[in-house]
Image (cartoon, helix red, strand yellow):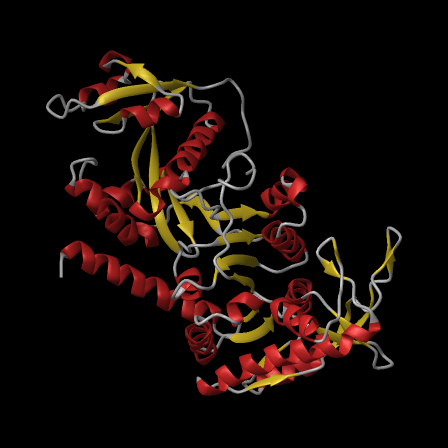
Amino acid sequence: MSKNTLKEQVAIIRQAFGYIERFHGETFVIRISSELIASPFIPVLMKDLVLLHHMGIRIILVPGARSRIDEVLATYGVECQRVGGVRISPPESIPFIQMAAFDVSNRVMTILAECGANAVIGNWVRARSIGVRDGIDFQSAGIVERLQTDVLVNVLDDGMIPIFPNIGWSAKGTPYNLSSNELAATVSVRLKAAKLFYLTNGRTLSSKRYTVPKGVPLAQDGTITQLTVENAGAFVELNADKKEDPLVTLVDLGYSACRDGVHRVHIIDGAADGMILKEIFSTRGLGTMIYSNQHENIRRMTRADVPAVLRLMQPAIEDAILVPRTAADLEEKVENYCVYEVDGTLHGCAALDVFEDRQGEICAVVVDESYVNMGTGKKMIEYLVDRAVSLRLKAVFVLTTQTSDWFQKQGFVPAAVDDLPPQRRKSYNVKRKSRIYRKTLPRRRPKIL
């Protein structure tokens, strides 16, 4: 095993154990698409969900039944129209919709039992009719009115996995056909879930198919990796012409759920082996995450961060990109550094050294390999430039041997050794021949960071 491979595996193990401790006792609501439930991938996915359950995560499942409902209705010759993604459900269709919904839920419960987990299907949803909208009577299609949260908490406390069929009942016992997507969002909000997952069967959000708000991070293949609540709302508006697109609907529901208190919503391809584990137990998932709380944070470095920052710097030092530094060096200038943190793990660092002539040097800029294409370096540079402005510096400069083009993209222009502060000019390493780039700062004072 190579040294780099060992480092990667150790990093993965550390991340996983950190997340296991963090999510123990938290509630995850997981909506599984009907196509995925009918696919050959479902037993493997269920094993992963049971693994989460055994780790102490409180799992709630909302299986989609759309495909199965279509099959049952076709078998019995019952026709239902869809408007705006909602199935208009005449009263005579409800027995067949119930049949399909509970058939799917029973399949899920059977697989869970085979994996050694106890589950229960319940009627915890009080519902009412959608009624008439824009002149259209949706008949027995319904929306959630109330959840029996106290009963659900008891079920979870007993170590069981609740399964929600997409059926709700009125106070008089009248059944209604519910959207499983909306049901999952409502359950996650009412139970104050830490996470809401929408597991699709191969569908992902990509910049190749949708209009993406400016500044949203993308993976190399164009996958939209993260959306803040604000960006999620903007995404829905930008793709209003695709309002009936299933993934746009999921982003809209995720946007609302996060605004109502759910920490994070994940839209991922559930058909890919181990995808949900990767999404939960690493800082770089493979799907799209909508988040309301501070998922990532640039902050000042503390002395406790020094060992992690040294590990972060080591590959760049070995490649002669970065000048070697010791723990003592970092501790001496700890107030000059900022770090880029995601879920308690450091993925980047940078520093601002201030000189007497009101110039500052941005140095020690390092981003780990998994975050290189996420705009991490740019965010840290912007953070330090704002700090320099707040300190009323007239300019910042950088010395680099291999990243000249990148710094020029950030607004830095070529400079000479004579442009350096006298103190820095004396310590300039002629043998290293670093290129110098400089950025003049505006005369303003934003809030101090």
Q: Position of residue 219 (x, y in %)?
A: 41, 44
Residue at x-position 66% and y-position 68%: 70
Q: Is residue 173 above or below residue 33?
A: below
Q: In this view, does 192 lie above or below 296?
A: below
Between residue 255 and residue 102, name the one nearer to us.
102
Q: Where is residue 319 in the image (x, y as percent from the top left)?
A: 16, 39
Residue at x-position 60% and y-position 42%: 235
Q: Position of residue 106 (x, y in %)?
A: 59, 83
Left or right of residue 237, residue 334 in this image: left
Where residue 69 sits, quadrant-wise, is bottom right
Task: Please indicate, yes or no, whether residue 313 appears anywhere in the rendered image.
Answer: yes
Q: Is residue 19 above or below residue 404?
A: below
Residue at x-position 49% and y-position 87%: 113
Where residue 349 sits, quadrant-wise, is top left
Left or right of residue 179, residue 139 in this image: right
Q: In this view, does 303 lie above or below 28?
A: above
Between residue 241 and residue 280, name the one nearer to us.
241
Q: Position of residue 104 (x, y in %)?
A: 60, 77
Left or right of residue 271, residue 26 in this image: right
Spot the residue most to the left.
Answer: 431
Task: Please indicate, yes or no, whether residue 192 appears anywhere in the rendered image.
Answer: no
Q: Tell me the quarter of the image containing the N terminus.
A: bottom left
